[in-house]
Image: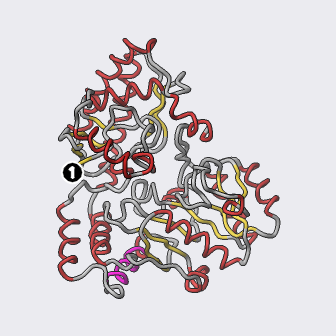
Amino acid sequence: MDRTNSRDRELRARAEAVIPGGMYGHQAVGLLPDDYPQFFEKGEGAHIWDADGRRYLDFMCAYGPNLFGYANPQIDAAYVRQLGLGDTLTGPTALMVEMAEAMVAMVSHAQWAMFCKNGTDATSMALTIARAHTRKKTVIRAKGAYHGAAAWCTPRPAGVIETDRAHQIFCDYNDVGSLEEAVRQAGDDLACIFAAPFKHDAFIDQAEPDLAYARRVREICDQTGALLIVDDVRAGLRLARDCSWSKIGVQPDLSTWGKCIANGHPISALAGADKARKAASAIYVTGSFWYQAAPMAAGLETLRLVRDTDYLERITALGQRLRDGLAERAKAAGFSLRQTGPVTMPLFLFDDDPDLRKGFCFSSEMLARGVYVHPWHNMFLCAAMTEQDIDGALDAAEGAFGVLKRNVGDLAPVEKLAFLSAGAR
């Protein structure tokens, strides 16, 4: 797709002058094919429009926050109504109590909830509470798992010093032996074990949690007094109307939430069991915007739709339709396409594609056909998608596979990702 004289290219040039690197975070320059837009102008339902007015079916859903559709009229109306009354005030409104009550009613392991702004806030707060509760320091977490962008957990090493990462031990996800070795290394200093709801690391196949592993994590925490933390920031409400590990019958002590709990409005949450209540009340955490009322109004309406609609069943059915259709079309084109993780949060990776050149080509061809997918990060389905949207995406994929088949021998390597993919693998 030629963007030589586009509005997007103009904005990139201006951004490069005033923003380090021109962009940062998960949209940083070089992490996606060069023809992908960096800037967008609007979203509606399951679609986004870039700064040049091109429309895409969006399988990134803003990297997860879009659950019920961009500009959902019911959720946004609740947000706007509260804006008319007050948003950032000297203290919270009654909506904070109502939102906490709604979270406690929804999350089976929880007896209390606290609110912040993004996933990193929630996971960092969980870590602090675990250390306050146990009066111990060491945290165990899985290699390659993402828990935020603070110094203690960021995947990028620049600016991070040894003390930022002190008192952390890493294990392999779903590997009981590796977990037990990490516990042995922790000795009597184990504060908590972080667990992802499933293995959703970038660049590699996703994996469901092994029940024996999950049960062993719970057992170890019970034996040592450490807290089990399930980081549901990314997967929350796309696998269950509860904490994601409720599906396998393993309950954490703390769970972290974000992204879609207010359908894209800025709020995240930490939900906890009574055993950690005293520690949660003892720590000092805050933010100038953490009490904002309008996102809580949006959150309450989002949780009402979670309770009262069949959104989860619908996105699951749509995800299965997508997975089956892609498998059929990839096979017909002669490609081995690995589709892993829950169907509501798919990841596509090609066999024999160590530097992602096939993935980048396929993704670019999908984009040219009006479908925004990602070559190395898990994607998301939202309740605004329809069967017609999925079928349109499958038609686009058939065309993209055809182009890839004709050009596979001439694809250039994707060198810009080496620093990321090498660490993930």
Task: Give, as a single range, the part of the protein colored magenta.
Answer: 94-103
Q: Is residue 239 above or below residue 296?
A: above
Q: Is residue 97 magenta?
A: yes
The residue under label 1 is 42
Q: For the N terminus, which image quadrant?
A: top left
- Which amino acid, by three-letter code, is at mark 1? Lys
Which residue is depicted at the point 54% across and 65% down? Answer: 123
Which residue is depicted at the point 54% across and 45% down? Answer: 201
The quarter of the displayed image where residue 361 is located: top left
Q: Is residue 422 above or below residue 210?
A: above
The quarter of the displayed image where residue 388 is located: top left
Which residue is depicted at the point 82% across and 65% down? Answer: 187
Q: Main secondary structure of the magenta part?
A: helix
Q: Is residue 393 magenta?
A: no
Pick the front one: 298 or 414:
414
The quarter of the displayed image where residue 60 is located: top left
For residue 222, side relative to residue 94 (left or right): right
Q: For the C terminus, which image quadrant?
A: top right
The x, y position of residue 288, in whole percent, is: 40, 78
